[in-house]
Image (spheres, rainbow, N blue to C red):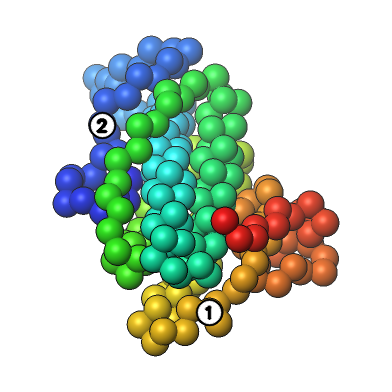
Amino acid sequence: MACNNTQAPPKMREPIVIATPYDSPSISNSGDKGSADEILSLAKEKTTDDLLAAFRSESTAAAKYAAFSKRADKDGYHQVALLFKAASTTEIIHASNHNAVLDESGVKVAPVNPEYTVKTTRENLQEAIKCERYEASTMYPELLKDAEESGSQLAVLSLTYALKVEKKYQRLYENALIATDNLRTKELASEYYICPTCGNTFEVKPSQRCGVCMTDSGKFIKIIGL
Ligand SMILES: [Zn+2]
């Protein structure tokens, strides 16, 4: 599940210490077909697993993009560094949202030990594009479908926020890669504004509300130089 820059297999099911308030329900098909309650229970369990995986993925991304930001700054790509800094902030918001939904249902998450590799800024941008594309096109749509089946409105909300914003970052990273290849990174944004609720990101401060979650733009987080 976690999008990382290694060739390691997906880490969605890696063991992690999680305190849950319940034992995993045993699933039995003995006798009748699964009842509606059993189906709903399974869907809820699946959504919990999904949110845990998404939390780990976002936490890893936050650390990774922070490291990419430092590397870009060191390489002299200050605007790309700023974009990675904004992305790291956004991923923290997404991880925090997922954590809040899990907490609401009594599930405690264990700290994440992020694994990633820092390469050149160009390679880091390629890695970031790959991750955002995967999250926006595959991961979050699948998790969102599970959440809708589980009936968890909070999970749907948290996953929708992340899905919409990851799509935006895919475009921002693609533009940054083009700018890097054309030696025009200085033309990239020199500040970003981030919605503290959903992570929505703007290169120019919007005058009214967030288009994803309706938060007043007066509450947005301003991201400036490192
Ligand atoms: Zn928002």
Give the vertical position of 192 relative to 118 (above or below).
Answer: below
Residue 179's spot in the image, x, y percent? 44, 81
Mark number displayed over residue 14:
2
Residue at image position (82%, 66%) is 208
Residue 113 in view (yes/no) = yes
Q: Residues within 10 Å of mark 2 (few under 14, many from 20)?
A: few
Q: Nearer the viewer, residue 28 or 31?
A: 28
Q: Quadrant of residue 135?
A: bottom left
User: Which quarter shows the N terminus?
Assistant: top left
Per the image, the residue denoted by label 1 is 186
87 or 155, which lies in front? 87
Mark positioned earlier in the residue sequence (1 or 2): 2
In the rendered structure, which amino acid carries the disc numbered 1?
A: Lys
Look at 39% across and 20% down and name the residue there: 18
Question: Residue 119 is drawn in which quadrant?
Answer: bottom left
Q: Secondary structure at mark 2?
A: loop
Q: What percent of the width, then of the height, locates residue 153?
A: 61, 41
Q: Alpha-carbon distance for marks 1 and 2?
A: 41 Å
Marks 1 and 2 in Cβ contact (< 8 Å): no
Q: Where in the figure is residue 170, as x and y percent of width and height?
A: 45, 68
Asked which quadrant contains residue 53, the reply is: top left
| Residue type for callout 2 | Glu
**111 is higher (above) or lower (below) than 145:** above
Is residue 47 visible in this depiction of the protein? Answer: no
Of residues 75 and 3, the one drawn nearer to the viewer in this rendering = 75
Q: Crowding at label 1, few (<14), some or many (≥20) Cα neighbours within 10 Å?
A: few
Q: Which residue is drawn at the image coordinates 56% and 50% (left, top)? A: 89
Left or right, 174 with respect to 217, comes to left
Query: Is 213 located above or below residue 175 in the figure?
Result: above
Residue 91 against residue 20 in the figure, above or below: below
